[in-house]
Amino acid sequence: MLRTAAVLSRPLSHGRLPQALLIALATLAAAPAFAQDATPDATTLDKIVVKGERAEVYSVRRTSAGTRFDLAPREIPQSISIISHQRIEDQNLDDIIDVLANTTGVTSTQSDSERTEFYARGFYIDNYQFDGLPTTMVQNWSYGDSGLDLALYDRVEVVRGATGLLTGAGNPSASVNLIRKHADSAELTGSVSVNVGSWGRTRSTVDVTTPLNASGSVRARVIGSYLDTDAQMDRYNQRKTLGYAVIDADLTPDTQLSVGYDYQQKRATGVTWGGFPMFYSDGSRTSYDESFNPATNWTYWDTTTKRAFATLEHGFANGWKFKIGASHDKTDSDDKLFYPYFTIYGFDKTTGAGVVPYSGYYQTERNVDAVDGYVDGPFQLFGREHQFMAGLSYNQRDFVNNGAFDFPGPMPSYLGWTGDFPEPAWAPMQEFSRGTITQKAGYAATRLSLADPLKLIIGARYTDWKSEDEGADRAHKVTTPYAGMVFDINDTWSTYASYTEIFQPQTARDRNDRFLDPVDGKSYEVGVKGAWFEDRLNASLSVFRIEQDNVAQITNEPIIGRPGEFAYEAARGTVSRGFEFELNGELAPGWNATLGASRYVAKEADGSDINTQLPQTSIKAYTSYTPQTLADLTFGGGVNWQNRIYATDAVYGRFEQDAYALVSAFVRYRLAPQFSVQVNLNNLLDKTYYSQIYGYGAYGDGRNGSITFTWSF
């Protein structure tokens, strides 16, 4: 629903919550007096419209995540986590890696220094949204998605389970929605911050909002950021540049237009491809220092993303709303990589033999066009008010991946590695893969008020999915249902049950040379939710079960017309079951906290565990406190704990990573009304742990810290 608000002297994101609320209340109370006492030379500002929900503390009071309906979190029949701007600021979270590492129920693993894969409930997360526009991100070629800078986003919303109603194809894991910052002030306001920290880190950020006309009905916001940092790992450096601009215009009191553009560039040198060896040929474990870099001195991995977007929203007098959004993004990647490939004889502890230098030079490009428009609003039926939502969605992703590689004979020795290895004389570039994946969809849902305490949400999405130029064209037409019921026990507690689906196309063929139907991900979930302090504090406890059907399994039958290739058949796949708990929001005035715990067990049809390199149990907690008697001081901290994980090598057996906890802390002090300083410490106990154990190894960051100086105006 569209909401109007009086102009604030500064956005909530730049001040403490109690002060911001007092300013807002004072402005509202004084508005009539200001209007009456205005001098002839004064400029009277029109009211501006604030779209969506501003995350005031660690949670939000209302969100459209998961359903498109504007609901309180406890009215949504799925597990949802909100990572607000205030929490991003408290924890000094830089990018999407940092955010998801601190999100309940989300785990991750690395492939190398530049690629991080995220999982929920045992399944890979490939569905992302920008302001609700769905897109798919995959890490196999790495277009830098996992390194998206957070400076331009107000908050991140994560819906766990199958999310096929709004996202289209994907895995039954989760959907990650990044909500952009907008020009939400009709007066000049902004901030400048400088952050310095461990390993030569420097990061500067400028964020300015200004009106573009006298009334403030047209406003602009510009954000710029630059990061330059080394790392715990020797010879590594990363530089990130961000530019963002958005114009928000109130075309009428009921019609808003947003147009924006963002530019993100990452330049990384000394990057790894894979990691270091975990075993010697005699089966003993290697013992590299935490600063060891298995890459050469000439490796780099550069990515550039340019994204343009526009959103138009109109609210009607009868409570109905129309919203349409469109975006175009272009991502280029250029990288030269070195992979220490180990022969079947292994890495000899004494001679250092057994390593083949595999080098790759890749240039890739991806273009994504997306359009999504919908209407939603109330209607009357049988004496009750209900809600209806329907929309159309289009998404097209084009990609081309070119490369060259060098695979000479074994190195004399890998012992004493320093990265001093000659760059190959690269062969001409070859096209490795290209494709165009198009999704056209229509979706609809209704929220029925069956009784005062009982609400039923039912809906479906029809998707026309097509892939071209990926070696063979594929096409599927799939309908994914959605059903959820919420029962309000009282004004605080509600209980819910939901059934959601999602599909994932696959390339396996049956004996008649036809592609198998997509993998069908089915998510069953029941739970209880609570809300206090006018929805400023939210809690949820859910129990879930996820099933995969139509998973390809190879047979002994040959594929007709394809000599030497064997057919696949559809069978039952992975089953994941578990629970999640989260408490998130404001526990008391000035005290914000989040506590999340999750546990799942995911097994293949034969009973074997999947993705054992991921923790099945994790606990994530963080809190901040501003004393009422010392309002200029804010302090807090948290802990992330995960259980033991392991990876199995066919030759050397199991490599285990014990359970561990990472402790962090921060303190912020406002030296003056417009100036603050903040200190963040990470891995406070300097725990040594692996961030990557599957095939190759890599260490997680040791103890590190940073200090941030911020000037707000």
Image (spheres, helix red, strand yellow):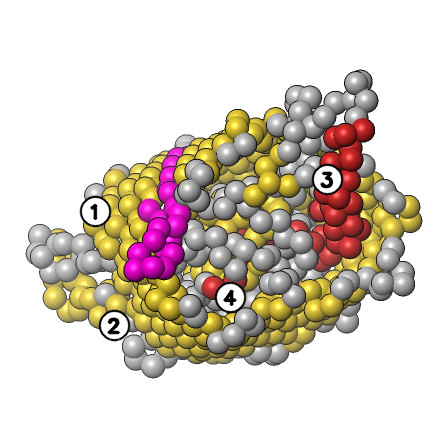
The secondary structure type at the circle numbered 3 is loop
Can you say whether 562 is above or below 697 in the image? above
Residue beneath the point at 74% across and 36% down: 32
Residue with the most extreme top position: 41
412 or 449: which is nearer to us? Answer: 449
How far apart marks 1 and 4 lie (CA) works out to 38 Å
Q: Where does the image place residue 395, in percent across and percent down from the top left?
A: 35, 40
The secondary structure type at the circle numbered 2 is loop
The secondary structure type at the circle numbered 4 is helix
Check disc 4 and report the residue beneath it. Answer: 74
How far apart marks 1 and 3 lie (CA) works out to 51 Å
How far apart marks 4 and 2 lie (CA) works out to 33 Å
Q: Nearer the viewer, mark 3 or mark 2?
A: 3
Determine which quarter of the picture holds residue 284.
Answer: bottom right
Check disc 2 and report the residue beneath it. Answer: 572
Q: Amino acid at mark 4?
A: Arg
Can you say whether 63 is above or below 660 in the image? above
Mark 4 or mark 3, earlier in chain = 3
Span colored in magenta: 364-390
Residue with the most extreme bottom position: 607
CB under 8 Å between discs 1 and 2: no
Image quarter where the C terminus lies is top right
Residue 475 - label: 1
Mark 4 or mark 2, earlier in chain = 4
Whether residue 361 is visible here, answered yes or no, is no
Residue 8 - label: 3
Q: Amino acid at mark 2?
A: Arg
In the rendered view, does 63 fall on the left or right side of 459?
Answer: right
Q: Amino acid at mark 3?
A: Leu
Q: Residues within 10 Å of mark 1 (few under 14, many from 20)?
A: some
The secondary structure type at the circle numbered 1 is strand
Determine which quarter of the picture holds residue 634.
Answer: bottom right
